[in-house]
Amino acid sequence: MRTTLDRDRAPLLALFSDFGTTGPYVGQVMAVWAAEAPTVPRIELFSQSPAFDVEAGAHLLHAFTRRLPRGSVVEAVVDPGVGGARGVAVVQADGLWFVAPDNGLLAIVAVRAAACRAWRVDWLPEGEISQTFHGRDVFAPIAGRLARSGVPPEPASPLALADLAHGIADPAVRVVLVDPFGNLMIGMRASSVPREARLEIAGEVFGYAPRFEAVPPGEPFWYANANGLLEIAVNQGSAARRFSAAVGTPVRIRA
């Protein structure tokens, strides 16, 4: 198996994870990247995907990577089964590369791509591998090598796209992220919902508005957020507080 990037090296290495922003994990991943691909720029794309929630992560990963430069390599880690039997998946989707646990995290990226190929990578770096930090010890070396050379390390074997699903729902009609303003991101594309539809959450029903100032302060509405996801907000308020909502809270779409 051989495949290459469109360039000699990736334009970016990007990290998507549930590591959070206060621990040592992001820095350790980037240190491995610096050793493996020292000339490739590195960014922390998003480190606050809901912890252990692979389905939420799958929807957010697709939404947040759509504007990355073509050829970029994304290491994605939401891995509650770290150290277990799940393998390592490498996916090339619409010009981007993804390295992640094969647990469903790449399901939405794969199903929504116009062009997609996938591999299971069995290569492991030399040296000690922690049983609890494959983001640093397994995925990061693979991502770095891929960014530097444009070739997934071998041994690797083709992986059927259907095998990436692992039961991940598309759409997921529930809250997948609460942002710092209390806005509620839903696991579905806003373009799939008619503008005349009304949403129901926690017993309240409300309609669409294109932007915040289109409704009075304190009023709830739904809209298409900047990343293409359906989102619920309260103008100059917190939808999370108003609806006592959190990741996992269900939402109903009403005609």
Image: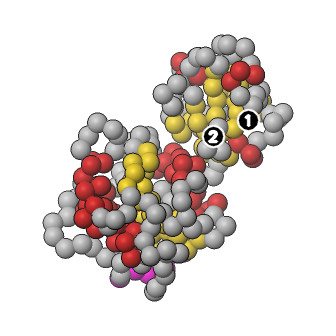
Please state, as top left, top right, bottom left or bottom right, where the N terminus lies in the image: bottom left
Q: Which residue, given by chain and number where applicable, does mark 2 sit on?
A: 226
| Left-right relation of 214 to 196 | left
| Left-right relation of 144 to 243 | left
Range of magenta residues:
155-160
Please state, as top left, top right, bottom left or bottom right, where the C terminus lies in the image: top right
Q: Name the mark nearer the viewer: 1 or 2.
A: 2
Q: Residue at x 57, y 28 (%)?
A: 183
Q: How does the figure colour the protein chain or chains?
A: secondary structure
Q: Position of residue 182 (x, y in %)?
A: 53, 25
Q: Secondary structure at mark 2?
A: loop
In this rendered view, identify the residue nearer to me: 37 or 235.
Answer: 37
> Crowding at label 1, few (<14), some or many (≥20) Cα neighbours within 10 Å?
few
Q: Residue at x 30, y 48 (%)?
A: 26
Can you tell which mark lies on residue 50? none
Q: Position of residue 140 (x, y in %)?
A: 32, 62
Can you tell which mark lies on residue 253? 1
